[in-house]
Image (cartoon, rainbow, N blue to C red):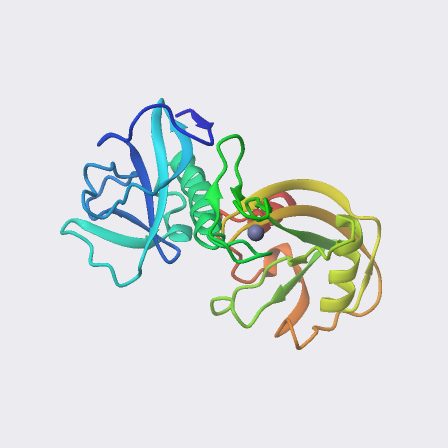
Amino acid sequence: MTFVPAISRFGESGDDDRVALFTGTALIIAAADELRLPTRGELAGLVSADTVHVGSLDGRPVEALRIASDEPLPDGWRAEPLRQLHGRLSDEEWAVAGRAFQLAEWDRTHRYCGVCGIATTRADEDRARVCPSCTHRSYPRHSPAVIVRITRGDQVLLGRSPHFPPGMYSTLAGFVDPGESAEDAVRREVREEAGIEIEAPRWFGSQSWAFPHSLMLGFTAEWASGEAVADPAELEDVRWFTRDDLPRLPPPASIARRLLDDWL
Ligand SMILES: [Zn+2]
């Protein structure tokens, strides 16, 4: 499958358009075994004309839309959290759906100008919503966040957030503050959440994370000094694990898991 991003579509919308339709963070999919993005024709009545164009998948337009959570779904369709569809929807469609979710959410939450309060319109030339009164432009929101795998000899440091499923631990992560480099954010987060100092963080890789609009910047680092103590405001527990004594790990879709699989 080949996805090509685009801001606006050529031609009128058609029943063959693929539609990433969301209610909350759940994607509407067929209740049948075959998991794929539905078409506009299949979702007739649910999809308004006011969709956000995402691009094209194998030459077919992909549109995004959010509907109210109390909207009844037609027979044969159900809503499933996008996270849980990883590995079941094709990787390409899952990534496109994540992109679609972020665009639909940005569009929905920027209908009015943040400066003067007038209703905004979509720009033709780039991915923006524009105020017709004061010309203020709003672009899709990204929230950069750092995530780091810290090792000490044959041990890895993992923390447990109270929001995690039972027994799960993960690598430390946090949002980058305005004015801060990603490397500085890694050092600060590790100091705040676990009370330790690390050697210089090394770049690992990044991942768009659509829950709700993060760009995860992955690093690895070696422990330098300090005893690991969890910051109770953020974590229930933080501790060192060896490879043969690991807790439940994050799901495969996450960069946290990629960081850990790379170490394993
Ligand atoms: Zn304005």
Residue 25, image quadrant: bottom left
The picture places residue 211, in percent across and down from the top left corner, at 49, 54
Between residue 142 and residue 210, name the one nearer to us.
142
For residue 41, side relative to residue 224 (left or right): left
Give whichever of 33, 216 is nearer the camera: 216
Residue 33 location (% of width, % of height): 22, 43
> Which quadrant of the view contains residue 151?
bottom right
- On the image, the x and y values in percent for residue 69 come to 30, 61
Residue 46, percent across and down? 23, 48
Can you say whether 193 is above or below 181 in the image? below
Relative to the observer, which residue lies in front, 1 or 124? 124
Residue 228 located left or right of residue 98 = right
Reply above or below: 248 against 222: below
Residue drawn 69% across the image and 52% down it: 148
For the point 71% across and 68% down, the residue is 193
Q: From the viewer's perspective, tell me whether residue 127 is left or right of residue 156.
A: left
**Callout count:** 0
The N terminus - image quarter: top left
Q: Residue furthest left?
A: 75
Note whether residue 264 is visible: no
Q: Splitting the image into 4 quarters, where does residue 41 fall?
A: top left
Front position in the image: 77 or 261: 77
User: In the displayed image of the protein, which residue is found farthest to the bottom?
Assistant: 232
